Amino acid sequence: MKIKYVIYALIAILLAYLIYNRLSADKKSNAYKAGGNSGANKISVNGVVAKAEDFADEVNVSGTIEANEQVEIRSEISGLIKSINFKEGSNVSKGQLLLKIDDSELQAQYAQALTKEKLAQETADRAGKLLKSEAISQEEYDNAAAELKSLQAQTQLIRAQLAKTSVRAPFSGRIGLRSVSNGAYVTPTQTIANLVSSNPVKISFSVPEKYSQMVGDGANVNFTVSGSSKVYTAKVYAKEPAVDINTRTLVIKALAPNANNELIPGTFANIQITLKAIKDAILIPSVAVIPVLNGKQVYVSENGLAKTVKIQSDVRTADRVLVSEGISVGDTIITSGIMALKEGAPVKVNVKTPAKD
């Protein structure tokens, strides 16, 4: 009988313990939920209020500034330099005389060729008259005519050689430093100077293949150069028809105005390309995003309680993410202490203004 009473007593004690725990848990739960109206048990956290703003999805790449046109000035023939007709570092016009090679020998050859051509012309004219009167044969006339054509070709050749003694600018631009002097002997293999046309300039850059269809002809790109904070704009005018199989990039070229010659060909350019622009976008601090098994989630404050919300985000900037689903304008996103929070935890949010990228 004593054992029976002991068992009954143990059962009664166990039931009393379970009832006490249940009542205690209910009190804690009610107090936990009531925390939204009482500051006693609230967790202090930081947060931001979601708002709509214009957003540009951008990518930065490196590029090079190139001259619109660039050529090494050379002489087509060898000879002594008679005169240099340009000032180093100056602007020159298309067709302007840059350098003259001594042509005295060619001038003598040209005068001799003209004399021979004149005599051959007279001979051919006489032969034509004699042929009409049948004083000479057709063969004799043909020989005289052939001699005239040969001498005319010789004269034309010397005239072309004379033209080559004048080295002229093929286009308008700025000429660089010369590497020859008056009286020096120049050959076709020797560079006289570099001629550059740099208004506009070309901006050459490559983009990863995944962006190749996002940058089309006529698109504007912004860029900066070393030593300056000024932002320049260029317009895409051409791109390679195929991606480079070695680098998996596509070469693109753009034109930028350069009236003041601020942009120097050959220098480095940091290029910013806008892939797409989004109006009324919602961006939140990346520190608020929690990776979970099936995606990503954030904590929002709703009626003073922490609530988990799953989100969709594709684009990430330096410290923010673009949210496409899950967050609405006006939602308060918790940005601190998120790893210690639980669903329904009472929170006191210190709202801060997020810094823009």
Image (spheres, grey):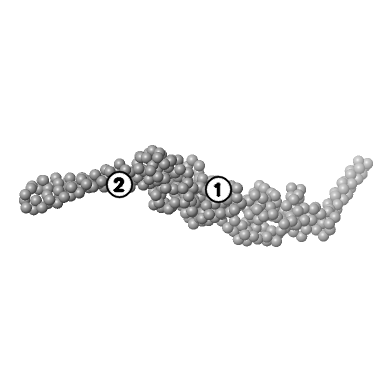
Query: In this view of the protein, which residue sits in the foreground, 194 or 48?
Result: 194
Disc sitting over residue 88 in the figure: none
Residue at (86% x, 52% y) in the render: 24
Q: Is residue 335 visible?
A: yes
Residue at (35% x, 39% y) in the render: 78
| Residue of label 2 | 160
Distance from disc 1 to disc 2, alpha carbons, whole Å, reads 44 Å
SS of the residue under disc 2: helix
User: Label 2 amino acid?
Assistant: Ala
Q: Nearer the viewer, mark 1 or mark 2?
A: 2
Residue at (67% x, 55% y) in the render: 356
Q: Position of residue 2 (x, y in %)?
A: 93, 41
Q: Position of residue 214 (x, y in %)?
A: 52, 53
Q: Position of residue 149 (x, y in %)?
A: 20, 47
Q: Is residue 2 left or right of residue 213?
A: right
SS of the residue under disc 1: strand
| Residue of label 1 | 269
Residue at (6% x, 51% y) in the render: 134
Q: Is residue 114 left or right of residue 92?
A: left
Quadrant for the N terminus in the image: top right
Query: In this view of the protein, which residue sits in the foreground, 343 or 261?
Result: 261
Q: Is residue 234 visible?
A: no
Q: Is residue 331 left or right of residue 142?
A: right
Question: In the rendered structure, which disc, 1 or 2, sits on the residue that comes first in sequence?
Answer: 2
Q: Position of residue 77 (x, y in %)?
A: 35, 41
Local crowd at mark 1 within 10 Å, few (<14), some, or many (≥20)? Answer: many
User: Label 1 amino acid?
Assistant: Ala
